[in-house]
Image (spheres, helix red, strand yellow):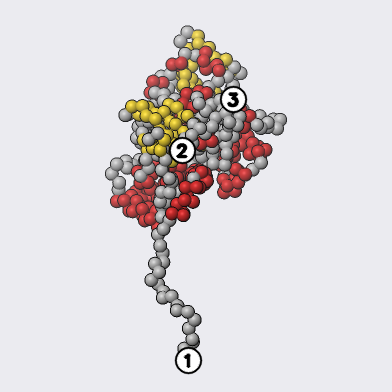
Amino acid sequence: MTLSVDSPQPGLAALEARLRQDLAWLELPAKRWMPPRTIDGQSVLDVAIIGGGMAGMAASAALNHVGIDAPIFDRAPEGYEGPWATTARMETLRSPKQLTGPALGLPALTFRAWFEAQFGAAAWEALDKIPRLQWMDYLRWYRRVLGLDVRNQHQVQAVRPRADGVVQLDIASPAGPQTILARRVVLATGRDGLGGAYVPAFAHKLPRNRWAHSSDTTDYAALAGKRVGVIGAGASAMDSAATALEAGAASVDLLIRRDDIPRVNKGKGSGNAGLVHGHLGLPDEWKWRIRHYINTQQVPPPRGSTLRVSRHPNARFNLSCPILDVAMIGHEIHVTTPKGVFVLDFLVFSTGFRIDWTVRPEFAALAPHVRAWGDRYTPAAGEEDQELTDSPDLGPVFELQEKTPGCCPGLDRVHCFSYPAALTHGTVSGDIPAISDGAKRLAQGMAGLFYREDVETHYANIQAYAEPEVFGDEWVPAQGVQEPVQ
């Protein structure tokens, strides 16, 4: 079930009126209070957000609500921010439908309100999981109804912290090259936003047109009649396998290293308000232990995604099947495993992502200086974890910190509001369940940082404030001591 938001339905119009009333009752957005700043005649933004997906929009909305302007710069065309309508291939979201997501505590801004306004309460009760493209429609509506300033087809080519209290963004835009100055920058760049797709080294033994990562924009229709191998057993592996099968692949072999597919989502079991608000203050050892345990247990693929694959008779689940070697022999890919050699035409690597600043040219000025957890923390024996080692060691407002103090002035003006913040802050910056909590933490923290930086200006404003509330005509001064009336 999908809906175009180009022509709002009567129920949606009523919902939008209610949302406007709710915002008015709450005095949101707050009035602007940031002192304007210019450098060499150029206006300086309060905050610039890189990335217009769910996290970027939630951050922008939360900042607006505390009176801070925060335009978004996104490289995608309007309506195609994030993965939902591009590289994502699942039929539905895995998150429970009732999660409030980026609604920031506003009932009329939830997906449920948006859905029921158009299809009714009975349809909501009948809904199992949220269809992926319908979630994208909701995010498009979210942007429109909040009036967020999203500047599409703006590709950030460099992020340059400066010693004069601003961060410079070099941007390629439809109007040509631009230089943007902002007092702070938020990286809301998604799951792969501080690196890229991970593929094992043996992938490079194969021609690049014979394999893809599950996050690539692959034309699955071209796999019709092909023998396809999918490496992995997570959600993206199932979605890739199902998409290939539905496109007419001759066969799909899932090559699964583990002896069994994970059954229990430990991350879901950890979700509660205590963890959302308490993770940031935990000792390092507990932060690491929790995140490492969830990583090693792995997140199972959704049941629906797995059934989507298994209903095809030409799908094969090969467990205990790690890759030992790959080779091109003639026009065929030969994949050697403990269970024999698989002869394939195409491979899909559903092998996740890595944090690696050096593979993102726009972060070249940051990469040598960002302090990672591995720069200061050594885990207990048996708890080694490369993803956690590479994770940025963030401050309380998601700010990057210097590996060597003084090496990159202004680095702490860049804030990581994407999945790699999870080790420091918990999962409040990339997933649906607690994204509003993370966005509020970011916005409130930034408001505090800005106020402290500008406290002299704000104090001067207090002194200069001269709007009277009492005018002197409310009383008549007494003329000395008066005798009491007899």
**Residue 196 x %, y %:** 50, 26
Q: Is residue 465 above or below residue 150?
A: below
Seen from the viewer's position, the closer of residues 368 and 357 is: 368
Query: According to the image, label 3 marks what residue?
Result: 257
Query: According to the image, label 1 marks what residue?
Result: 486
Earlier sequence position, callout 3 versus callout 2? 2
User: Distance of mark 3 from mark 1, alpha carbons?
Assistant: 103 Å
Seen from the viewer's position, the closer of residues 358 and 81 is: 358
Earlier sequence position, callout 3 versus callout 1? 3
Q: Is residue 306 left or right of residue 322?
A: left
**Residue 370 x %, y %:** 56, 30
Seen from the viewer's position, the closer of residues 362 and 348 is: 362
Query: According to the image, label 2 marks what residue?
Result: 183
Q: Which mark is residue 356?
A: none
Indicate which label's residue lies in the foreground, 2 or 1: 1
Indicate which label's residue lies in the foreground, 3 or 2: 2
Residue that lies at the very extreme toward the front in this rendered image: 480
Residues at marks 2 and 1 touching, judged by CB atoms closer than 8 Å: no
Residue that lies at the very extreme toward the bottom in this rendered image: 486
Q: Quadrant of residue 27?
A: bottom left
For disc 2, the neighbor class at 10 Å (few under 14, some 14 to 19, many from 20) is many
- Amino acid at pointer 2: Arg
Residue 482 visible in rendering = yes
User: Distance of mark 3 from mark 2, alpha carbons?
Assistant: 47 Å
| Residue plotted at (59% across, 37% down) | 423
- Amino acid at pointer 3: Arg
Indicate which label's residue lies in the foreground, 3 or 1: 1
Residue 85 visible in rendering = no
